[in-house]
Amino acid sequence: MQTRIFSGLDIARDVHAETLRRAQDAGIRPTCRVLLDASNAGARAYATRQQEMAEQAGIALTVLAYASDPLAIYRQLAALRDDPAVDAVITLYPLPQGVDAIAAALAIGAEKDVDGLHPMNAGNLLLGAPGRGAATAQASVICAEALFGNLAGAKVAVVGASPVVGRPLTMMLLDRNATVSVGHAATRDLAALTRQADIVVSATGVAGLITADHIAQGAILIDVGISRSNGQILGDVDLASVEGKATAVTHAPDGVGPITTACLFRNIFGTALSRRPQ
């Protein structure tokens, strides 16, 4: 069996096109402000790519530098929250020293939070109510459904319990009636957990963590983790090890990554639509 390397580029283009069509039908151009640490080259590069891709979805995305200190940053976020010309606000990681992610989400407000970090948005997801979920978690579900089909009854192992991937993803999978197990840094025998799964989603940023010993024959691997070594971008999955044993592995970074951006833009459109008079 040859392992399929799955690209999310086509799905991402379809989501962008749908977002653009809906925005045009509604007669709106969603606006978003992205804040970043201007000294961080990785964050700058990511924000530049976001700006370029936003045009495909009909979104006006502007990049701003964080203010000089935590208190000023919270005020900056609150000002954007209260600005009627802004539909959504994104805080790129790494956050400046002293800035708390939840406090930042509270300053942005639930209405303009498109990362699903505001307690109201996170709470709606926990309760199974309609809400705005984290884009990477949404993209992981889309990949799983594209590769596996209906997730009802599927055994899924989620590796990683972060508030932006592992935790919201677990709730989204439960909403689709999957049977979900969660592994993390304190899990004593990770391989014993993941070998039971039809689908393994790994979001740790530990290069090569998932090997052939971690998976069942025919498993599907959703590789969310990204790390860099010697100029290379690496995922959580050791591709050479799982070749021929896994049915499919999402490409790192072109599997989940492009769909994450598309889901983020779809969230931005959602905030813009909810703020317009109906």
Image (spheres, rainbow, N blue to C red):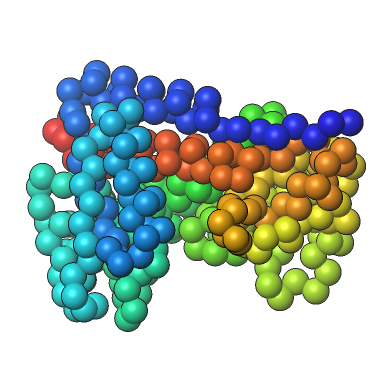
- Residue 135 drawn at (x, y percent): 45, 46
Please report the residue visible at 68 percent of the width from the left and 68 percent of the height from the top: 184
Left or right of 44 in this view: 60: left
- Residue 275 drawn at (x, y percent): 19, 40
271 versus 186 height, above or below: above
Seen as rendered, the residue at the extreme bottom is 98
Q: Splitting the image into 4 quarters, where does residue 206 fall?
A: bottom right
Q: Splitting the image into 4 quarters, where does residue 29 fall?
A: top left
Q: On the rendered image, what quadrant is the N terminus found in?
A: top right
Please report the residue visible at 24 percent of the width from the left and 78 percent of the height from the top: 70
- Residue 268 drawn at (x, y percent): 30, 41
34 versus 162 height, above or below: above
Left or right of 265 in this view: 128: right
162 versus 256 height, above or below: below
Left or right of 244 in this view: 201: left
In this view of the protein, which residue sits in the foreground, 107 or 231? 231
Left or right of 277 in this view: 234: right
Please report the residue visible at 71 percent of the width from the left and 75 percent of the height from the top: 186
Please report the residue visible at 23 percent of the width from the left and 21 percent of the height from the top: 24
Residue 210 shows in the view = yes
Q: On the rendered image, what quadrant is the C terminus found in?
A: top left
Seen as rendered, the residue at the extreme front is 230
Residue 177 shows in the view = no
Q: How many marks?
A: 0
In this view of the protein, which residue sits in the foreground, 277 or 258? 258
- Residue 222 drawn at (x, y percent): 67, 45
